[in-house]
Structure formats: structure tokens, C-alpha cells
Image: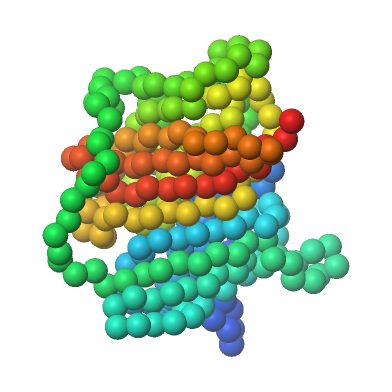
Amino acid sequence: MALQPQPTAGEPAPGTRCWQGRAHPGYQNMVGPFGGVTAAQALNAVLQHPDRLGEPVTLTVNFAAAVDPATPFWLEATPARTNRSTQHWTLRMLQPDAHGADQVVLTGSAVTAVRRDTWSATDAVMPQLPPPDAVAPTPWGGPIPWIQRYDFRLCEGSLPQHWDGSEADSLTRLWLRDEPPRPLDFCSLTACADAFFPRVWRRRALMTPIGTVSMTVYFHASRAELAATGTGHLLGQARAQSFFNGYFDQSAELWNQAGHLLATTHQIVYFKE
């Protein structure tokens, strides 16, 4: 069976507006599943909701606990308010604990909207990199399954060759796409927004434990732009702005090969000394 970037959220639970799903073993990370695919599952619950208005504008997810890959979860996607062209959503993911009591593992929010054709411009500048066909795939190696679900082609800012505490800048630029390739959609774009290794590893050359606390994705493209991207590689650029008392931020941009900025993202990440 070909692995998908995100397992579909499934069918609504009988008598409720929840969705049931399970973490896919192909997206397992060091502790629980890859956060990007969990965020994509949360967005998928909104996209499949029968009352949804428009397309995603923004998604925020807060990771309260690691998702247990051995246990089904429940996703609640609730339209909190619907205006003429915008819709505000609240999200919650629940899993039972060892005693069968539901525990919150994720909270979040989203905004969808019916966009109008207006004046548009992009002030961000797309980095100039060799085309993806001219860059060899990057063999990350290691036992982490989710990394094998992506074709990474690193251009600048690799992981440290020596984990010796020497400091460097936090910038990384690369090409990436799903492996195996599949047409881009909002869920796969959401997962790609989290596919950068932690900036603190690049900055300090220390393999410190980390965990994303909160992640926001801003969507700058419609379904038509994503369809036009097809199975092409995305140019990803990630950096940090500050590392302070156990937390750092991480921002990233995702462009298609035609030069369209598809999404920007920002997250706050815990790290341990």
C-alpha cells in the first residue's frame, strides 16, 4: 500500500460530529508521530466537515501530549462562528488514557474563507537555488520512519557533521516533496511546513531533546495553485529568530517551482539542556 502524507480522518463517530483516526506507523517520530502529519489530520477534520465554508487561511495546533500510535484518537472540529465569507474553527484531539478516560493531546484553531480576486503581491523573495533535478537526494539515514516519507534535497544549512557544540547560523534551504510523490493539497502542504529538522541542532551542534509546543501555518494559495504545483518539489527555507530559556522559535517559507509562495509557518519549540 502506498503511504499517504496523512491518514484520512475517517468517518464521523455515530451520533457525533467527531472524527476518528489513528496515527500511521509510517510517520512515526522519536516520540509519537511526526507533528506535521498530526497537524494535517487536524486540518483534514475541518476540510471534511459538511458545514465548512471556503478554503484554509490559517491553522494553529498546540501539541499538549504525544499521540499514542497504538490507540485511536477522536478529532473534534467545531465551527465556532460563521460570517459572510469567513469561518472560525476550534479543534481538539482526544485519546483514552490507561484507565479509559479521554485526555486532550491537541488543541487548535483554524480560519477558512471564501477568497475574492483582489490585488495581490509577495514581498518575500524566493531564494535562488539550483533546480531540484540538479541536487542529489539527501540520505538522512537513521531509524526514524517519517523522514523516509519525504524526498529531501538539501542545498544549504545541513545538520552538523560533528556534534561538538560549535555554533553556526540556523538557516536551512532545501527542496522537498512527498515520497512517493503525490499531488499537493492543503493537508500535505501542512505536513511539509513541519518537515525541517530543529533549528537548535543546526545552531548549537548538540543533539538536545526537543518538542514542538505550538505551530501555525498561513496559507497563501488556493486549491488551484496547489493543483498546478502537482507533484513538483517545494523550496523550503527555515530559520530561527531567538533561543531563550528552554524555547526557540522556528519560521519557514514554502514555495513552488513556479515562484508562488504557498505557505509561511511559525512554531515555538521546547528544548532541553
Q: Which x, y percent locates residue 137?
A: 39, 23
Compared with residue 235, is residue 38 higher up or lower down, i.e. above or below?
below
Q: Residue at x 83, y 62 (%)?
A: 98
Q: Residue at x 15, y 64 (%)?
A: 118
Q: Position of residue 219 (x, y in %)?
A: 34, 56
Q: Residue furthest bottom?
A: 15
Q: Tell me the residue at 50%/67% (across/down).
A: 109
Can you see residue 18? yes
What residue sits 69% from the left and 43% below the top? 31
Q: Front-most of 209 and 132?
A: 209
The C terminus appears in which quarter of the rendering?
top right
Seen from this angle, which residue lies furthest right? 99
Q: State the scheme by which the image is colored.
A: rainbow
* Relative vertical location of residue 57 with respect to residue 260 in this rendering, above or below: below
234 or 260: nearer the eye? 260
Q: Nearer the viewer, residue 246 or 29?
A: 246
Q: Position of residue 200 (x, y in %)?
A: 59, 30
Splitting the image into 4 quarters, where does residue 164 fall? top right
Residue 10 in picture, x, y percent from top left: 52, 68
Q: Is residue 1 in view? A: no
Q: Is residue 164 left or right of residue 120?
A: right
